[in-house]
Image (spheres, rainbow, N blue to C red):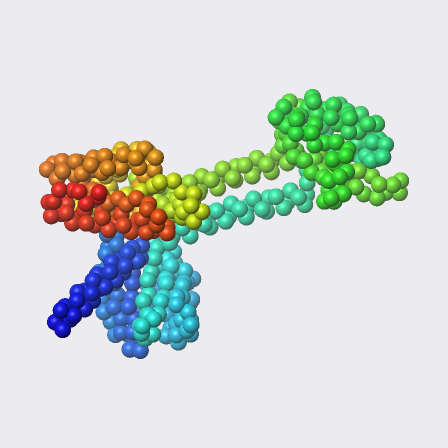
């Protein structure tokens, strides 16, 4: 009987440790958490440590919803106060969470005079519906990045629509599709001066192809000669109602982007082919510039501002790509290395955050110099990760030994000590499972380093 009780006790303790670890992992990235009793309004407020993401109890109170009303004017942007107070209402939350696990709210928060976007996730406990957990996460960088990308896309769409409505035709031809006799209309002065073509004539398609050899950009010539035939133009109009071809054209020796459009209209004399050459140079160059800006904005969103390496957003994107490859069984061999810089909080507290930032940069350089052939990511605070493939993957044990020797030297010279854990993909369902094993080994290694034990847990 006693043995069974001891086994039950050990299992309970083990389960408690598992849930504690899960809670710790889920708390990362959240700045504030509240544990609220909906029946009594009692609550416990937790803050997460900026460097480690560890939950710390900040205060306890007896009237959560009243406290929200008092603090809303201080901590919530004035334009978001109404929706915040609507959400932080017992009746609203009971209805919002009825039959649902989570309710979310994005709003702007104020701290130290700065305004930033946060995501608030409210969850009802399944084993006791009287309790909810409210978690607040800083998503300011992500929201601002998305809005910038949306603004660029909207500008591109508006610009394209305006061009489609107004057009900028440099020349228009009316062609008899039967005889190919043509007349030129609405030619710009620059076009007339550049081509010096006849205002009317015969054999429209043949003459257009002759002019193309002289005036089309060399890189666009083959495409034009292949596509712009009477048969192709009329067949495309029959299928889609219009013909369109974009290419580069030399106008007075200057290359410009143009779009040739053609359509059939009925006139008194019979069907006529209307062919217009539209100057889209400004539009195309604007789109290219906006595409460049969008690519640059997306690239900046992937970079950690302190170290210059890839950030957590980039790591998540890489993980998602790997997950898709795992689903299709098309992934190469890879390993996840999780690294944690020791003593950062001590340096920040004793020497200041500027010294702490320099300490992180030194740690980052050590990691990048060690894993030279793999992408290195800063996940936040003092935590880094590596997705190792190819050469680094093949020599992983040697690289981990390098980290171990560096740590041994640093322990005697007050240098940078970096806890390290590694796990290789081994039929796992996704990257998260590999990361979890590497993260566990990193914490084991960190404990050994603090205890002065030889660094071998990373293996």
Which residue is at a point 32% across and 51% down the rendered structure image?
433
Rendered view: 141 above or below 228: below
Q: Quadrant of the C terminus?
A: top left
Quadrant in the picture for residue 408: top left
Q: Residue at x 27, y 59 (%)?
A: 22
Q: Position of residue 310 (x, y in %)?
A: 35, 41
Task: Give coordinates of residue 229: x percent, y percent.
Answer: 75, 31
Q: Is residue 372 left or right of residue 322?
A: left
The quadrant of the rendering that contains the N terminus is bottom left
The residue at the point 17 percent across, 67 percent down is 7
Residue 24: give x, y in percent of width and height. Answer: 26, 58
Residue 320 visible to the viewer: no
Left or right: residue 337 compared with residue 86: left
Q: Nearer the viewer, residue 459 or 289?
A: 459
Which picture quadrant has residue 136?
A: bottom left
Total numbered labels placed on residues in the image: 0
Within the image, what quadrant is residue 60 found in? Answer: bottom left
Res. 323 in view = yes
Q: Where residue 74 sits in the image (x, y, percent)?
A: 32, 63
């Amino acid at each position: 009987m006693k043995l069974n009780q001891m086994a039950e006790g050990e299992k309970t303790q083990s389960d408690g440790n598992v849930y504690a670890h899960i809670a710790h992992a889920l708390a990362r990235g959240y700045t504030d958490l509240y544990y609220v009793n909906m029946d009594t309004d009692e609550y416990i407020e937790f803050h997460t440590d900026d460097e480690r993401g560890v939950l710390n109890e900040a205060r306890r109170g007896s009237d959560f919803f009243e406290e929200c009303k008092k603090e809303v004017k201080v901590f919530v942007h004035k334009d978001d106060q109404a929706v915040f107070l609507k959400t932080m209402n017992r009746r609203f939350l009971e209805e919002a969470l009825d039959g649902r696990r989570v309710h979310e709210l994005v709003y702007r928060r104020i701290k130290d005079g700065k305004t930033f976007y946060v995501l608030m996730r409210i969850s009802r406990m399944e084993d006791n519906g009287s309790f909810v957990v409210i978690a607040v996460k800083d998503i300011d960088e992500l929201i601002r990045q998305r809005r910038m990308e949306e603004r660029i896309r909207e500008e591109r769409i508006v610009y394209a629509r305006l061009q489609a409505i107004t057009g900028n035709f440099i020349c228009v031809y009316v062609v008899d599709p039967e005889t190919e006799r043509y007349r030129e209309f609405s030619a710009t002065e620059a076009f007339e001066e550049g081509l010096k073509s006849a205002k009317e004539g015969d054999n429209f398609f043949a003459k257009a192809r002759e002019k193309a050899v002289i005036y089309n950009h060399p890189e666009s010539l083959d495409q034009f000669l292949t596509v712009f035939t009477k048969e192709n133009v009329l067949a495309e109009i029959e299928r889609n109602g219009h013909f369109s071809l974009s290419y580069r054209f030399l106008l007075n020796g200057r290359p410009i982007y143009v779009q040739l459009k053609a359509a059939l209209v009925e006139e008194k004399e019979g069907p006529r082919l209307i062919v217009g050459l539209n100057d889209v140079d400004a539009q195309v160059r604007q789109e290219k510039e906006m595409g460049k800006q969008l690519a640059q904005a997306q690239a900046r969103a992937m970079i950690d501002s302190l170290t210059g390496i890839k950030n957590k957003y980039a790591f998540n994107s890489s993980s998602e790509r790997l997950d898709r490859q795992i689903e299709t069984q098309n992934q190469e061999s890879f390993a996840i290395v999780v690294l944690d810089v020791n003593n950062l909080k001590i340096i920040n507290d004793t020497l200041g955050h500027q010294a702490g930032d320099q300490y992180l940069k030194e740690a980052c350089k050590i990691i990048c110099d060690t894993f030279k052939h793999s992408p290195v990511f800063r996940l936040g605070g003092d935590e880094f990760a590596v997705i190792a493939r190819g050469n680094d993957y093949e020599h992983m044990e040697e690289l981990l030994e390098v980290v171990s020797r560096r740590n041994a030297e640093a322990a005697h010279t007050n240098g940078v000590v970096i806890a390290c854990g590694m796990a290789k993909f081994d039929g796992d369902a996704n990257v998260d499972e590999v990361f979890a094993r590497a993260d566990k080994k990193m914490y084991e290694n960190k404990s050994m380093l603090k205890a002065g034990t030889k660094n071998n847990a990373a293996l």
